[in-house]
Image: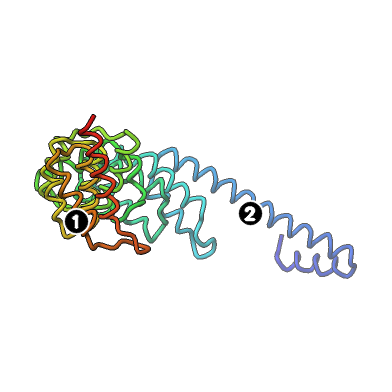
């Protein structure tokens, strides 16, 4: 129908209020129907794209158009597909996708954990330790319990690169595993890392938890550490595996150590006082 004729019909109909209402309703209904059809087509296209695991198309769909703006359902589709398939992708491909999604799409915790697991499958430990364990509580540690421990022990005894802060964060997690009786590493495994971590209080705490008898020389050395918490943990270790010759050094620190912890506490004095009492009791039994 000629647009001029259509306009004339609408204008004629609008001479009455009821006619104008009917025309407005018709126009609005058509807009609604067109939008619903477009949404249905978009949803069908999204489902097919997810089924094909087409990350490139999902990323493009997420960006949307100037008219639609960013499309959250396509972004979520990308996040879900990446999470489900990261460990099946080539490590470099997954890593590039992950980094590309940081700004364009946004990362979720499941995506981060999936990326960490992908790196573990490829044994790309340098990237894993530098990117996913920069601080305690970073997503990606928890799913890695067994492999994380093995990787940490391998990394620290084979000359692998690990920043001190990263190593400390991993050790804190492994101490938690040890306390939960979920750590698989043996005393020998951990003692092999002593060259790197002998003066780290969390590392010493792990040896204490494991009651490593061969750690006695480390505990003895730890009593002389500049780190007050290493001295405190070493006292506790000697209470469990020490000998009679250690009673006097423990007593001495219990009365003379000057290290102050938080809230005016004296952790070395407290630990050593408790330790020599327990050591005396253990040796007398």
Measured in 3D between alpha carbons, the distance from the residue under mark 1 to the one under mark 2, in whole angstroms, is 54 Å
Residue at (14, 52) in percent of width and height = 161
**On the image, numbered disc 2 is attached to which residue?**
35
Q: Nearer the viewer, residue 131 or 20?
A: 131
| Relative horizontal placement of residue 225, taking residue 35 as reference (left or right) | left
What is the crowding at mark 2: few (fewer than 14 residues within 10 Å), some, or many (at least 20)?
few
Q: Nearer the viewer, residue 27 or 228?
A: 228
Residue at (49, 60) in percent of width and height = 70
Dot 2 falls on a residue whose secondary structure is: helix
Residue 176 in the image: state x and y as whole percent. Answer: 33, 42
Residue 281 in the image: state x and y as whole percent. Answer: 25, 36
From this viewpoint, is residue 199 visible? yes
In this view, the residue farthest toward the front is 284
From this viewpoint, is residue 91 visible? no
Q: What's the image's color scheme?
A: rainbow
Q: Nearer the viewer, mark 1 or mark 2?
A: 1
Q: Which mark is residue 163?
A: 1
Which comes sooner in the sequence, label 1 or label 2?
A: 2
| Relative horizontal placement of residue 226, taking residue 3 as reference (left or right) | left
Dot 1 falls on a residue whose secondary structure is: loop
Answer above or below: position of 203 versus 52: below
Residue at (54, 48) in percent of width and height = 42
Q: Quadrant where the N terminus lies?
A: bottom right
Answer above or below: position of 205 versus 65: above
Write down the quadrant of residue 276 in the picture: top left
| Relative horizontal placement of residue 155, taking residue 64 as reference (left or right) | left
Residue at (77, 57) in percent of width and height = 26
Q: Nearer the viewer, residue 146 or 64?
A: 146
């Amino acid at each position: 129908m000629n647009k001029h004729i259509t306009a004339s019909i609408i204008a004629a109909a609008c001479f009455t209020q009821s006619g104008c209402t009917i025309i407005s309703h018709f126009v609005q209904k058509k807009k609604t129907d067109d939008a619903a059809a477009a949404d249905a087509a978009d949803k069908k296209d999204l489902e097919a794209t997810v089924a094909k695991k087409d990350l490139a198309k999902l990323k493009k769909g997420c960006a949307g158009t100037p008219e639609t703006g960013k499309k959250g359902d396509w972004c979520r589709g990308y996040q879900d597909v990446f999470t489900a398939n990261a460990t099946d992708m080539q490590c470099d491909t997954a890593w590039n996708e992950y980094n590309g999604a940081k700004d364009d799409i946004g990362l979720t915790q499941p995506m981060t954990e999936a990326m960490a697991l992908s790196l573990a499958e490829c044994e790309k430990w340098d990237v894993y330790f530098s990117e996913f364990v920069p601080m305690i509580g970073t997503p990606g540690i928890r799913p890695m319990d067994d492999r994380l421990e093995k990787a940490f022990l391998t990394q620290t005894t084979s000359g692998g690169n690990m920043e001190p802060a990263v190593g400390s964060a991993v050790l804190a997690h492994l101490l938690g595993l040890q306390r939960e009786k979920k750590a698989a590493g043996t005393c020998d495994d951990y003692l092999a890392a002593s060259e790197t971590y002998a003066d780290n209080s969390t590392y010493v705490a792990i040896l204490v938890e494991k009651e490593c008898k061969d750690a006695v020389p480390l505990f003895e050395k730890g009593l002389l550490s500049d780190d007050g918490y290493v001295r405190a943990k070493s006292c506790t270790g000697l209470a469990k595996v020490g000998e009679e010759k250690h009673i006097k050094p423990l007593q001495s620190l219990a009365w003379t150590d000057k290290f102050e912890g938080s809230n005016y506490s004296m952790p070395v004095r407290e630990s050593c006082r408790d330790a020599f009492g327990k050591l005396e009791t253990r040796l007398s039994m």
